Image (tube, helix red, strand yellow):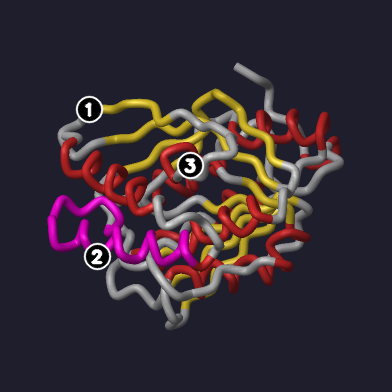
Amino acid sequence: MTERKERADMDTTVSIITVTYNSAATVRDTIESVLRQTYAPKEYIVIDGASKDETLTIVQGYEIKFIEKGITYKVISEKDNGIYDAMNKGIRLATGEIIGLINSDDWYEDIAIEKMIAVYDRSRFDLFFADLRMHLPSGKTFVKRARNRRYATSRDWNHPTTFITKEMYLKYEYRCDTIHDDYDLILRLKKKNVKTEVLNEVLANFRMNGTSHEKNIKKALERIKVKYHIYKNNGYSPLYIIECIVTEVAKLIVK
């Protein structure tokens, strides 16, 4: 196992952000995965949307552990205007050179930040993402591979493994319009030809139990409409409606 690197030995600073809301059942996995990083982040910011369960109590209970590791720990709990509004709040607060967003259903592999930094040291990217291990409700898992190609598809991109420079995030914040605003941001960055790096190693884990993966035909049709609207707004061909349909059919089939 890679020996943990001390904060004083690091040149590139990293901020990790987690957005939570009624996440008591899963948030410990997320937080502990940040604590286990072999390359410690400069800070960890938790933006809670005024949870009504035990989420905030759990989150606040980790403060001493982060202090002991020399990681700044910031917790904010207040009502927000949705997940992307909360993410934007965290991004504005972040002081690291690079920002990672890991949601409260997901968790990092121990070497996630270290692997990302190794790539950044070589290339000084604007956008980075890697492979993701998907966890189905059945208990089965599979790896969703990351790719960077001219054709634009969310099937190539993995949000939990994504790291973007603070500079890019300040230029292109989340729009706070739809459930797919994260992919909208990726399409905007792609259109701007920002320097992008992809690593074909699993750096995070994703539970397929969120709103974007509901196995419901009505919901799937709604997601197709929203996704196509995002492609259209970013100047992509009307033929991308096929991509939207293919992606949603795959979600309905996988078990």
Q: In this rendering, would 99 be left or right of 209? A: right
Q: Residue at x 43, y 83 (%)?
A: 79
Q: Nearer the viewer, residue 247 or 100?
A: 247
Q: Which residues are magenta?
A: 211-232
Res 140 label: 1
In the rendered image, residue 114, in percent from the top left (x then y), is placed at 68, 31
Residue 57 in view (yes/no): no
Q: Which SS class for mark 1?
A: loop
Residue 126 vertical placement versus 140 (above, below): below
Residue on which disc 2 sits: 222
- Identify the residue at image location x=38%, y=60%: 227
Residue lying at 61% horizontally and 59% vertically, measured from the top left:
188
Amino acid tagged 2: Glu
Residue 23: image quadrant is bottom left
Q: Is residue 226 above or below residue 7?
A: below
Mark 3 against mark 2, which lies toward the viewer?
A: 2
Say whether residue 235 is left or right of residue 118: left
Q: CA distance from mark 3 to mark 2?
A: 21 Å
| Element class at badge 2 | helix
In reply to whether residue 192 is colored magenta, the answer given is no
Q: Mark 3 and mark 1: span between their CA atoms?
A: 18 Å
Q: Which mark is residue 158?
A: 3
**Gap in Å between the C-alphas at discs 2 and 1?**
27 Å
Q: Nearer the viewer, mark 2 or mark 1?
A: 2
Q: Place residue 113 in its image quadrant.
A: top right
Of helix, strand and loop, which mostly describes the magenta segment?
helix
Which is more N-terminal, label 1 or label 2?
Answer: 1
